[in-house]
Amino acid sequence: MPRINGDRLWADIVTTARFGGTDKGGVTRLTLTEEDRQVRDWFVGECRSLGCTIDVDGIGNIFATYPGEDPSMPPIAVGSHLDTQPQGGRFDGVLGVLAGVELIRTLKETGTVLRHGLTVVNWTNEEGSRFSPAMMGSGVFSGASCLEAIEALTDRDGTTVKTALETIGYRGEIPVGHVGFAAYVELHIEQGPLLEAAATEIGIVTGVQGVRWFDVSITGTEAHAGSTPMAQRDDALVAASEIVLAVRDIARRHSPGVGTTGFATVGPNSRNVVPGTVQLQIDMRHPSEAGLSQMQAALEQAVAAIDAEIGLKHIWSKQPVVFEPATVEAVRASAEALSYSATEVVSGAGHDAAHIAGICPTAMIFVPSKDGLSHNEAEYSSPEECARGTDVLLQTVLQIDLK
Amino acid sequence: MPRINGDRLWADIVTTARFGGTDKGGVTRLTLTEEDRQVRDWFVGECRSLGCTIDVDGIGNIFATYPGEDPSMPPIAVGSHLDTQPQGGRFDGVLGVLAGVELIRTLKETGTVLRHGLTVVNWTNEEGSRFSPAMMGSGVFSGASCLEAIEALTDRDGTTVKTALETIGYRGEIPVGHVGFAAYVELHIEQGPLLEAAATEIGIVTGVQGVRWFDVSITGTEAHAGSTPMAQRDDALVAASEIVLAVRDIARRHSPGVGTTGFATVGPNSRNVVPGTVQLQIDMRHPSEAGLSQMQAALEQAVAAIDAEIGLKHIWSKQPVVFEPATVEAVRASAEALSYSATEVVSGAGHDAAHIAGICPTAMIFVPSKDGLSHNEAEYSSPEECARGTDVLLQTVLQIDLK
C-alpha cells in the first residue's frame, strides 16, 4: 500500500501559510488578491514541475492533471480551495489542495500508475468573504450559478470579479464546466468539535446539511422604563428573547439539526427606555429537507404565538446534499484498511463538494480540528492528523480507480 | 376660590417652547446652553416684572420669591426645571415652573395675600443629559452631592459645569442651600400612561420609586453555527435571553415594581457565528427599599441558575422617597375641592422633588401625558389638563399657607 509523506505535506502547509501570513500564525488571503495570486502561482509551479497539465477556466478554477493510463476515461478529482477568511487559518481548504499535490508526488515516487488521470482542483472563492456568494468557483462549474452574472459581482470597493481575475492573471481561457469527473473527493478539516471529542481520527462525511436563513423584525413600543407598568409594555427585546430561546428549543427537538440567532440589534438601546425595535438574524441547519421544513414550521408557529408585531422573512436556502454511497463507502473502506478509527458525520459547514455532488459521485474526508476552531487564526490540526487524512484520500482514489 | 388663567399659562408654554424649538414641535434645550440662558432670562424678567426678588445660587438654581405677609416665615416653594432632553418635549419640567409664574400672576390680580412668601424655583440640570448626574441642581441644594465636585464635572466636549454656568451668566453669588422652605410642591406631567388610561385628571403623587441599575457581562464561546452541535454550545445570547425574561418575570412577581433590560450588545454579531459575548444594562424600580432588595436577590438567583459565565454588577441606586403625608393630603383635598377626579400614584420617573423631600415636606401633582409619551417631541398635555394641574397647585399652596 503506497503511503504519503507527512513531513513533506506539513512543509507545504508551512510554505503556503507565508502567502498572507498574520502575526498570530494565521492567514489573511482573500480571493483574487495579490496573496491569492502568490499561492496560485506556487501551486501551478509545483504541479507543472511534477508533470501535470494546467488548465484555468473563466472563473479562475485551476485544474492540475497528472496523466493516467487511459486518456479516454474522465479524471478522478480531488482538491478544495486556497483562499481564506480574514484572520483565518492555515488548514481550511488549503489541506485539501496540498493533499492533492502530495498524492501526485507519492504516485510519482512509488511508480503507481492510475487508469484515470488525477486532477487536483483549486476552486475560486470558496469563502465568500470578499465577494458573495461563497463556493463561487464550484458553483459556476457545476451550473448552480451562471458565469456572466457572477463575473459582474463587486466587492465593497466596487471591483468586479472579472476585473479581479484579470488583475491577478487568472481569468482563464478554458470554458467553465469543461470536464466531467469520474468522482470528486475533498479532504477538509472538520471545523467542529465532534471528532476531537470522540477521539476519532477520520470523519466519513455522508453529506452536507441544508441551511435556511431567516430575518426577524420586531416592532414594540418605546417607553419610559420607570413610569410604564409591566402590563402596559410592548417590549421588543422581551419578544426577541422568546424567539432566541425558541430557535434553541426547536433545534434541540429536531436533532441533529442546529439553530442559531447570531445577530441582534436593539433600538433605541438605552438602559432606561423599554426597547421599541429589535432585528434578529437566524441560521437553521439540518441534514434533511424534511427536517428543515419542520424546523421552519415550528419557528413560524413560535413567532405567531408571541404577542408582538413580528416580521419573519425566509431569505435564503441551501438544500441538504447526500453524497453518493459508493464513494462514501470507498472512504470508509480506506480508513479501515489503514486501521484508522472513523465515524460517519454530516458536514455542518458548506463546501465546494456540496456543488460538485450535483454533477458527479462525491465524498468528503474530515480530520479533527483542535477545540473545534475554524475561521480563526488558532485553527489547528496536527501533522499526524493531516497525514492520516491524506493517506485516506490516496487509498480512496486508488479504490475508485479500480472501478 | 381664586382660579388661574389657563390661556395665559398656555401662552407661556408656547412662548418658552421657542427657546430651542425643533421642527417637529419639540424642544432641544440642554442645560447651561445658549437656549437655556434665553429661557432663564425670560423667567427672571417675567418674575421681576411681577414684583419678585431673584436669587441665583452657585449651581445656577434660580429662586423667584413673591413676598408674603410674614417675612419671618420660610417661603413655600413650587417649581421644577426648564432644561430638556435632546428632541424632548415642551412640558417636561417646564409646566411646573410656568405654573409657579401663573400662581404669582393670579395672587397679584386677585389680591390674594399669603402669609408665607411664594418661591418659584428653576432647578439646574434636572435631565442629566449634557452633564451627568440628573437632578443636579436640587441634588447640591439638598446636600445629596457637593458643589465643588459637581462644578468640576465635564460634558463630552470637556467643558466643566462651572465654566458653563459662567458662560451663560448664571453662576450665582448665593451659597447653595441658602434657604429652608415651609414645603415644596412640584407640578409635573405624568410621563406614563396611567392617568390617561384611567381617564383621571389629577395624580396625587405619594412618592418616587427607588432605582437599582445592574450591568451584566456574559462570556460564552464563539463557534461555527453550522458545525457545532447544540449540546456543545456556550451561547451568550441564549443566556442573555434567559436573563431578559427573568428581569420581566421578577418585576411581574414584585408588582408594582418594574424591570427593564434597555440595552444589549452581542459579539461578534454575525448570523452564522454562535455569540461569544453579550453586554446587558438593566433598570429595576420599586416604591419600597424592601421590594428593591427582593428584586435584586431574585435577579442574583436567576443569574446564578443560568449555566454560563456571567458577571453581574450593581452599579447605581437611588432609594425610594415617600412624600410627607400632610403635604400629600393638601394635594388630595385641593383636587377634591376643585371636583377633579384624582388618584394616588407613585412616580416612576426621578424628579427634583425626590431630593427636596429630604429637607422639607414635599409633594407632587401629576397631569396626564397623551399616550404616556415623554422625552419625545410628541409629548403632550392639553391646555385644560395643564390648567387643572395648576389650579390644584394654587389650592395646595393656599392650604399649606394656612398651617
Image (cartoon, coloured by chain):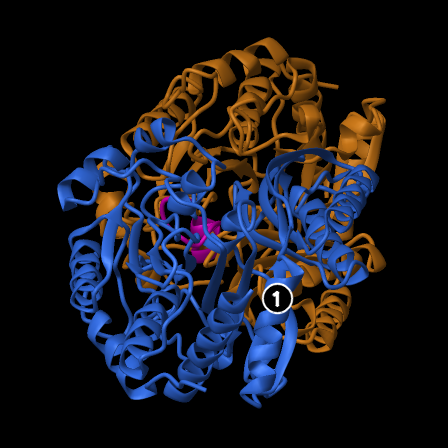
Chain colours: A blue, B orange
Write the residue at 14% across / 41% down.
A167
Q: Residue furthest top?
A: B7
Residue A135 percent location from the top left of the image: 43, 48
Q: Is residue A283 above or below residue A223?
A: below
**Image quadrant assignment for residue A101:** bottom left
Total tally of numbered discs in the picture: 1
Q: Is residue B130 magenta?
A: yes
Q: Which residues are magenta?
A: B129-140
Task: Mark yes or no: residue B320 visible.
Answer: no
- Please give left or right for residue B360 compared with residue A132 in the image: right
**Image quadrant assignment for residue A68:** bottom left
Residue A247 percent location from the top left of the image: 71, 53
Write the residue at 41% across / 56% down.
A75
Task: Mark yes or no: residue B134 visible.
Answer: yes
Subunit bearing disc 1:
A
- Please give left or right for residue B348 compared with residue A73 in the image: right
Query: Front-most of B252 and A216?
Result: A216
Q: Is residue B255 above or below residue A337?
A: above
Under tag 1, what secondary structure? helix
Write the residue at 39% across / 19% down.
B49
Picture quarter with the C terminus of chain B: top right
Picture quarter with the N terminus of chain B: top right
**Image quadrant assignment for residue A160:** top left
Query: Front-most of A263 and B74?
Result: A263
Residue B333 percent location from the top left of the image: 82, 35
Q: Amino acid at mark 1?
A: Val
- Please give left or right for residue A387 compared with residue A191 in the image: left
Q: Look at mark 1 in the image and give the residue it sits on.
A: A328
Residue A56 percent location from the top left of the image: 25, 46
Q: Is residue B339 magenta?
A: no
Query: Front-most of A54 and A349?
Result: A54
- Please give left or right for residue A109 compared with residue A257 in the image: left
